[in-house]
Image (spheres, rainbow, N blue to C red):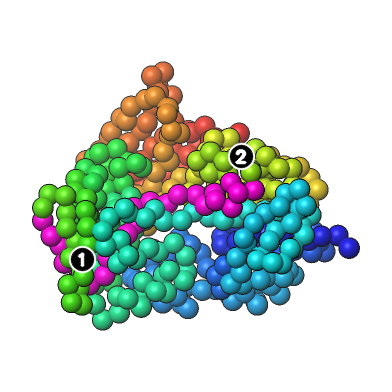
Amino acid sequence: MTAPLVIIGTGLAGYNLVKEFRKADAERAVVMITADDGRQYSKPMLSTGFSKGKNADGLAMNDAGAMAEQLKCEIRTHQTITAINPAQKQVMLGNEALEYSDLVLTLGAEPFQLPIDGAEYLYHVNDLMDYQQFHAAVQGKNRVLVLGAGLVGCEYAHDLGSAGYEVDLVAPDAQPLSRLLPQPCGEALIPALEQLGVTLHLEKAVTSVEKQGDQYAANLSDGTQLTADVILSAVGLKPRVALAQSAALEVNRAIVVDRHLQTSDGNIYALGDCAEVDGLNLLYVLPLMNSARALAKTLAGTPTKVVYPVMPVMVKTPTLPIVTCPAAENVQGEWEIHGQSPHFKALFKDTSGNLLGYALTGDCVAEKMAMNKKLPAMLA
């Protein structure tokens, strides 16, 4: 009997891969393994749940049983892979050895843990079960402190502010979304957040957190102190690579894969937030979806290289619409800014005047489709 295709992870990457795979192969045995409860949900929706009045059950679309039936596969929940044995083509679940014909790692990324005193008091929301805990923690509370002004931090501050919470946002950056937007575009988000009741504390960092009765006090780098009922840390993610490293797979910033999503082992693949494709580790939905479609064809017998077209990032801050398509890292160039706050069109051009990225805010977001046509594909 042929060993199954084994997929570790039932997040957006894992479930989308099997959905695409079933379009080409309805018969091959598939086993999915997850450390959580296996509910299907859309991860981008985690940072819009409060303004929509949804708890974790409200964000979940299907349970593991329904997904197993829909995808004609076995889903094993609340199980942890303790090791991968590439030579024997086995994954270990404690003492159980599960054989695979091909193995796919959709391990995702994990929240960066701040190395500060009181870090144990911080919540992180990286999956549905995290959201469930955080949602429960803020019920009946008023003041939430959000750490980090990147994509997730800004989206959560906006979502919580929209839901009526008093929000403090602390970040060492000089502006929101500093890694995605040029200065004027990032600064345009500040009044949009403030009108929702979000107070920004930029160019500051939390140095420690202490419990004070039912609340928490966060000490900042400038000597001030903020009090909050709940603290959410959204200071970044790092790809989960420990399992791959222990199996001696090639790892750089993430698990190194080629354009076929194949790791340094011929029968092991990786996609999503844990994978580095041609040097690119992109923690967004569109690269993941493109990778799932390509890998599904490869696993079904038609080797297919992943292609990354122009993949804009939509920032979920409805008070000020923002879309950006950042240039690749280490590309030399400058931003060219047009418009007035809060309606900006920013163009990133190289020294020859070639357009390599853009950022649009406010009414200028309407130009997204036209801008996409002018950009080169990320991986052609």
Asked if the stretch drawn in magenta spans residue 228, the answer is yes
- Amino acid type, label 2: Glu
Give the Cα separation between the discs numbered 1 and 2: 40 Å
Name the residue rendered at 65%, 38% in the picture. 258
Q: Nearer the viewer, residue 365 or 31?
A: 31
Q: Is residue 346 above or below residue 77?
A: above
Residue 198 as seen in the image, left or right of residue 48: left
Q: Quadrant of the N terminus?
A: bottom right
N-terminal of the two: label 1 or label 2?
1
> In this view, which residue lies farthest toward the front?
95
Q: Identify the magenta region.
A: 224-247
Asked if the stretch drawn in magenta spans residue 330, the answer is no
Q: Nearer the viewer, residue 309 or 15?
A: 15
> In this view, which residue lies farthest toward the bottom?
140
Give the residue at mark 1.
210
Q: Position of residue 298 (x, y in %)?
A: 74, 47
Q: Nearer the viewer, residue 337 or 215?
A: 215
- Amino acid type, label 1: Glu
Residue 347 as seen in the image, left or right of residue 18: left
Question: Hey, which quadrant is residue 77 in on the image?
Answer: bottom right
Q: Nearer the viewer, residue 20 or 98?
A: 98
Give the residue at mark 2.
250
Name the residue rendered at 64%, 48% in the picture. 247
